[in-house]
Image (spheres, rainbow, N blue to C red):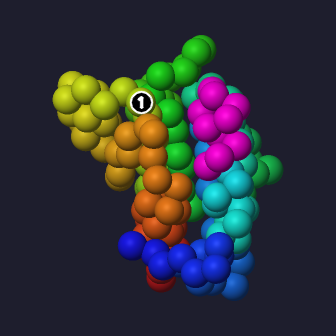
Amino acid sequence: MMQQGRGRRRRSVSSLSSPRVLVCDDTDSVRSLIVMNLELEGYDVMEAHDGQEALDLLSDPTNVLPDVVTVDALMPRRDGWWTVSMIRSDPRLEHLPVVMVTASVQSHHRAQAEQATVDAFIAKPFDPDELVAIVGVLASAGRVG
């Protein structure tokens, strides 16, 4: 777990360029909370309001792919389950680590997340430090070598 001191968190990811994260959540306040915490740690953050917008960003060849994607499970238009399945079925995207951040914490949703091969599952309400730590581990793992 990351240490806090005097209101500042230490960055858990060290690299010459800022790791990128795509944050996908339909709730503005939740998305803003995630974005703010990641940006405070030095991440370059892209935002999407639903799964379709996330996939559009990921499919745009002019965008640099993120190192990690966070996604809510239940969203209008295209939900997190659809989004993860599209990421995993695309050879260009299938390697991206995905963190599901959701209020849907019933056992069948956790099983569905495992089946969809998400890399981490975080229940809302969540500890922002825990989310940043998990994103840091996944971003570091994907950036090695």
Does residue 27 show up magenta in the picture?
yes
Determine the residue positioned at 45% across, 39% down. Answer: 125
Looking at the picture, how far across and down is residue 28, in whole percent? 70, 32
Query: Left or right: where does residue 106 sit relative to residue 32?
Result: left
Q: Which of 82 and 28 is in front in this view?
A: 28
**Observer-nearest of 7 and 41:** 7
Q: Residue at (68%, 51%) from the top-left corner?
A: 35
Q: Can residue 11 be seen in this view?
A: no
- Residue farthest to the front? 6
Tell me which segment is drawn in magenta.
25-34
Q: Farthest residue in the top direction?
A: 77
Q: Residue 113 in the image: x percent, y percent?
A: 31, 36
Residue 91 lies, with reference to residue 28, above or below; the image says below
Quarter of the figure that contains the N terminus: bottom left
- How far across and down, in percent of the image, does residue 93 sit? 51, 48
At 31% from the left and 44% from the top, the residue drawn is 117
Residue 140 at x, y percent in the picture: 49, 74
On screen, residue 125 versus residue 58, left or right, reads: left
Q: Given the current orientation, which residue lies at the most extreme right position?
A: 62
Q: Which residue does the numbered mark 1 point to in the structure image?
A: 103
Crowd rating for badge 1 (residues with CA inside 10 Å; few <14, some 14–19, many 20+):
some
Query: Residue, x 54% and y 76% (percent of image)?
Result: 4
Q: What element does badge 1 sit on?
A: loop
Q: Is residue 10 left or right of residue 79?
A: right
Number of numbered discs overlaid on the protein picture: 1
Above or below — where is 8 with respect to 113?
A: below
Can residue 123 be seen? Answer: yes
Q: Which amino acid does label 1 sit on?
A: Ala
Q: In this view, does 105 lie above or below 142?
A: above
Q: Is residue 91 magenta?
A: no
For the stretch drawn in magenta, the main secondary structure is helix
